[in-house]
Image (cartoon, rainbow, N blue to C red):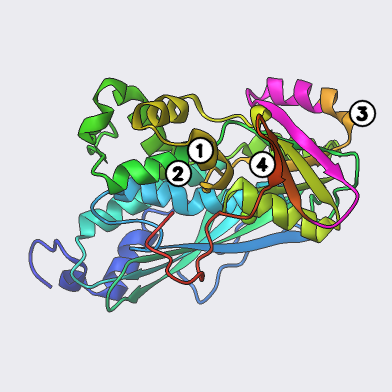
Amino acid sequence: MTIHPTRIDDVGERELLRRLQLRIPEAPGVPVGVGDDTALVEVPSPALVTVDSLVEDVHFRRESAPARLLGRKALAINLSDVAAMGGVGRHAIVSLCLPPDLELAWVDSLYDGLLERAAEAGVAIVGGNVSRSPGPIVIDVTLIGESRGPLLRSGATPGDLVVVTGELGAAAEGFRLLEQGARLDEGGELAAAPAWTEPLGEAVELCVWAHLDPRPPLVLAGSLAERGLAAAGMDLSDGLSSDLADMCRQSGVGALVDAMAVPVAGPVLELERLRGGDALALALHGGEDYELLMAVDPGDFEALEELARVWGVSVTPIGEFLEGPPDVRLTDADGGRELRPGGHDHFAAGEGPAE
Ligand SMILES: [Mg+2]
């Protein structure tokens, strides 16, 4: 060990783990937290359990994603899945695969983000693992949650409204902007942006933030599940066109979406107008919005809208579920067409890094 360790290989895995363990606070419902062979936790019954990972050069690039925001996102994407099942996150386990030449300061910042996001969501980090990676950084989080009323993908019936929370497309726009050189500084302010975006600095910053620090509507999700206000639900991670197709397949219904009703995020409209691009396509296929997609009985929509207003979340009906084969159709000014899944598929041939 050197006198002033700055990299992981200056301290070794065991010392790094000890260093991280010291930062994790004790929590109620966790008789034994980090440090023993396993954690001992009071698990809700039945429990929701999920896992998701962020892989360098697949989901993020080290030069454009600040470590603190990656920590926040690694937890947020799991919180989003638990919320989309109608639950609330409780206990998280964090597994890190890290190259030995990585700066300790980077790992400290990652943990700043993880602990900050965990505190915001009322989640206790109860265990973890650190392994050496021969190359990319991998951040893997397992989350245990408490169900408030199961919200399955298979519950949509003909006549239900297709409803989304929030606005769509900003995260996908943010990813593109990062690929084109947009950067945040340490404080999270916009430090660089592609030249063509010059008149729209604020829009660039909002989209980059949407990509790097997603804010799923966690409280609304648990609350609406408790009240039974949605018949089916899932989070929008792969893109509306892919995710809605999956809900249709699992529910055995079709869907008709009104292109004019899709809530495209304002900054995306501004940027795509300037670029001469297609804002609607980003909202339909972009992915990583981490908003909720739901099937809602028309008789429940008003109550849902009222509840969403309490939590400061917008809910928008964008179409209807129909009897028939599990296809999604889109109506727009040109008439109607089939909406083919165009979102992210990690194993699709020719897939480039992250989206
Ligand atoms: Mg999901």
Element marked by disc 4: strand
Q: Quadrant of residue 296?
A: top right
Magenta stretch encompasses residue 286: no
- Mark identifier at residue 128: none
Residue wearing tag 3:
299
- Mark identifier at residue 169: 1
Q: With respect to residue 271, does 250 lie above or below? A: below
Residue 78 image point, x, y percent: 57, 54
Alpha carbon separation for disc pair 1 and 4: 13 Å
Element marked by disc 1: loop
| Crowding near the residue tagged with mark 3, few <14, some 14–19, many ≥20 C-alpha atoms within 10 Å | few
Magenta stretch encompasses residue 311: yes
Residue wearing tag 2:
172
**Ligand 1 within 8 A of label 2's CB?**
no
Residue 113 shown left or right of residue 162 in the figure: left
Q: With respect to residue 6, does 278 lie above or below? A: above
**Quadrant of the rendered image holding ligand 1:** bottom right
